[in-house]
Image (spheres, helix red, strand yellow):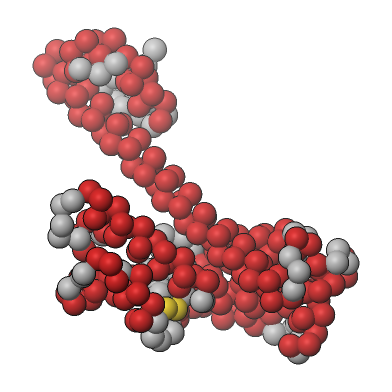
């Protein structure tokens, strides 16, 4: 996307652009997935971008659930199944009592001091916050239910890590950041896994196609060694493809 926005081919300009865009995303994240147009233009002030390029930046940010001078409605990105799940999940949270701002601050301070009761109370207070943050990361390749689950795990561990900050406000910022980082890592990890699965599927498909062609030429099933010699694959690649699909490539003889 960065390369699509940039028209200049100079590597240094692309690097500075990518760095500024990452800074904008980081700032928006710190501000609750919202950023001002003035902040964006300030970040790119030294790069003399056109209005068309700024427009493409805005589109890019919107695609990442970041509002420019406005809050986006996360519900717009939820599927019907996710909305149904969320309705059921939130109904369960309604049993939790509401906490005042003063009680929230007291729980943060208690957790910072290492008080176990304060930590447990803080988890209950922030369970609805996890839902709100998870909705910001909807429609990015991970089910809302999984995002909430990952956020809850981060919340449970995070409340025990607040002793390094000095104020309740810093503790809250740290906790929110941990929740967002956990969800972003889940999304990134899922993307890596999907890419790995795609590559394995491509590998099996190429080996199966080559095996079919060679089997038709020979009039019989082929061995992994024959396919390696004639098809341009390493013998290990052929064996890996067989293992991935449980030996279900019908034109290769099982060994």
At 40% across and 68% down in the image, what residue appears? Answer: 24
- The image quadrant where one finds the N terminus is bottom left
Left or right: residue 193 compared with residue 130: left
Q: Residue furthest left?
A: 217
At 38% across and 41% down in the image, what residue appears? Answer: 197
Looking at the picture, how far across and down is residue 67, in whole percent?
A: 39, 79
On the question of residue 135 being in view, the answer is no
Query: In terms of image quadrants, where is residue 148?
Result: bottom right
Looking at the picture, how far across and down is residue 38, in whole percent?
A: 36, 81
Closer to the camera in the image, 235 or 72: 72
Closer to the camera in the image, 108 or 167: 167
Looking at the picture, how far across and down is residue 91, in whole percent?
A: 65, 82
- Vertical arrangement, residue 151 with respect to residue 67, above or below: above
Left or right: residue 106 compared with residue 15: right
Left or right: residue 113 compared with residue 23: right
Looking at the picture, how far across and down is residue 201, in whole percent?
A: 32, 38
- The image quadrant where one finds the C terminus is top left
């Amino acid at each position: 996307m960065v390369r699509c926005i940039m028209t200049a081919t100079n590597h240094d300009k692309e690097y500075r652009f990518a760095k500024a865009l990452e800074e904008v995303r980081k700032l928006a994240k710190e501000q609750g997935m919202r950023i001002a147009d003035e902040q964006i233009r300030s970040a790119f002030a030294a790069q003399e971008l056109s209005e068309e390029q700024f427009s493409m930046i805005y589109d890019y940010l919107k695609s990442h659930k970041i509002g420019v001078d406005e809050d986006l409605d996360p519900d717009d990105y939820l599927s019907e199944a996710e909305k149904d799940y969320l309705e059921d999940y939130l109904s369960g949270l309604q049993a939790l009592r509401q906490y005042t701002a003063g009680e929230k601050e007291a729980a943060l301070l208690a957790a910072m001091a290492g008080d176990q009761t304060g930590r447990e109370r803080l988890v209950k207070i922030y369970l609805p916050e996890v839902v709100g943050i998870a909705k910001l990361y909807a429609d990015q390749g991970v089910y809302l239910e999984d995002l909430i689950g990952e956020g809850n795990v981060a919340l449970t561990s995070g409340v025990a890590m607040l002793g390094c900050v000095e104020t309740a406000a810093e503790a809250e910022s740290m906790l929110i950041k941990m929740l967002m980082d956990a969800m972003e890592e889940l999304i990134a990890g899922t993307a890596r896994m999907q890419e790995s699965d795609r590559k394995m599927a491509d590998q099996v498909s190429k080996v199966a196609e080559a095996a079919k062609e060679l089997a038709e030429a020979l009039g019989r099933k082929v061995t992994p060694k024959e396919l390696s010699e004639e098809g341009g694959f390493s013998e290990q690649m052929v064996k890996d493809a067989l293992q991935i699909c449980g030996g279900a490539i019908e034109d290769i003889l099982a060994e």
